[in-house]
Image (spheres, rainbow, N blue to C red):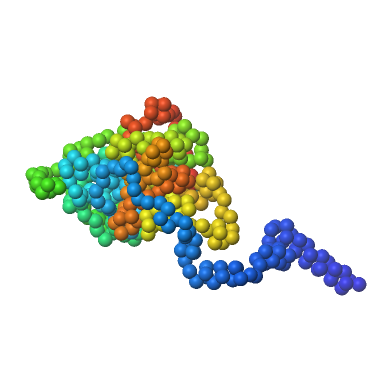
Amino acid sequence: MKRNLLTIIAVLSICSTQLMAQQKGEINPETLKAVKASFQKSPTNDALINAITHNDIKKLAQTRDSDGAVNHYFSNKVKVNGITNQKSSGRCWLYTGLNTIRPMVQEKYNIGDFEFSQTYNFFWDQFEKANLFLEIAKATANKPMDDREVEWLFKNPIGDGGQWTTFADNIMKYGLVPTSAMPDTYQSEKTAMMSRLIRRKLREDGLKLRELSNSRMSEEAKNNIKIEMLSEIYRILVLSLGEPPVEFEWQFKDKDGKISELKKYTPKQYYDELVGIDLSEYVMFMNDPVKEYNKLYEVQYDRNLLEGGNWKYINLPNEKIKEFAKNSILGNEGMYFSCDVGKQLNVEKGILDLDNYNYDDLMGVKFSMDKKQRIETFESGSTHGMALVGVNILPDGSIDKWLLENSWGAKKGNKGYLTMTDRWFDEYMFRLVIHKKYIDERTLKILNQKPIMLPPWDPMFAPEL
């Protein structure tokens, strides 16, 4: 009798365990049976299995109707010349920023093929970001390592990505040089290993500074230790990228074959003479339907200079942003533009269009999130920066497509350019930077608002690569 009772108790225990498993949402035999029954054996499904298991899904999803549906002709285009190539680096933000001001220099001096040195400004970007990290590590030393802010800091001590604010502050502080004064190196074109070593060193130094912050050591002694840390970062950068020039000589040949006078410059003098514009006169816009429109926002720690400004932007509906973008192109000025470039991109044809690929019909599964939902779930965000340089205005005044100057070299896309449809702009454009002269007064007044501070881990604020 006792043994039977124990058996009943054991059975009840097993049943109870199975019931709890079902309540927890675990997959039980009944659930698995229902799921398996949903996939019916058929000639169509057999053909899909054969195709998908042996081929590139993206190629299979490419739509026939998209072939030839979008051309590369534009009614209005900024005068640009030459395509750049960031290669295996995350410097698109720097290339994009320089590509927006390069046409001004080319037109001013009647120059054809010309580039600023990306390596020069990238060097100072990395050095300044290292200093910013060390200072934040000191400032947050009283918080535990598992505090979300501290955790974010040590997960992201430095990177080669960025956005407009990092570009503008860098240029205004350090100036510019031509590629001849500081050309690319193997490490500037393939930044992964150098960045890994710098991150490792900064994490180590950050821990030391946290310990020193709570010690009785004098502030002068602590600062000397930090200078030693920065000196090691400087050494890694010089060995990898070369040492930035303090002065250099430059001359050029214009399109008519005329050779200029050989002149000596400092980087700041070079910027002032060749470009000479105030980059603080540009405004960044965002289209983020998660947040309230017509508000000014600021992103904590999103900068590369300790003394620089955090990234600030005005959140606006797409139609308003397009209005300002059209004004800028008609004024022959390109813009810093960033987007989720990997979505619906046919890189061979150089086209960004919502109809390029149909994954729904290929998989028999509906993908139905809108832009807001994609942002909230980390499915979509800004991943790449390019220069917006063209618009196609139809006879009725409407717009059907836009032109982007990319930095992946002339062999990618349409000779280095990407054409995006206006519908794609609505879904995957996130940031655009435009000079104040192309923006109406009502919108500019938003800049007077007290900005709403956002954390650096917000889904929208990964830097462009």
Whether residue 380 is visible here, answered yes or no, is yes
Front residue of this view, candidates 61 and 10: 61
Residue 387, position in %: x, y? Answer: 33, 46
Q: Could you say which quadrant of the image residue 37 lies in? A: bottom right
Q: Could you say which quadrant of the image residue 456 lies in? A: top left
The residue sitting at 60% across, 68% down in the picture is 45
Farthest residue, direction right = 1
Looking at the figure, which quarter contains the N terminus? bottom right
The residue sitting at 75% across, 64% down in the picture is 18
The residue sitting at 52% across, 40% down in the picture is 290
Whether residue 191 is visible here, answered yes or no, is no
Front residue of this view, candidates 206 and 162: 162
Is residue 400 found left or right of 261 in the rendered image? right
Residue 34, position in %: x, y? Answer: 71, 64
Front residue of this view, candidates 19 and 317: 317
Is residue 342 found left or right of 250 in the rendered image? right
The residue sitting at 28% across, 38% down in the picture is 332
| Numbered disc total | 0
Residue 196, position in %: x, y? Answer: 36, 58
Residue 299, position in %: x, y? Answer: 43, 40
Farthest residue, direction front = 395
Question: In the image, is residue 375 above or below residue 188?
Answer: above
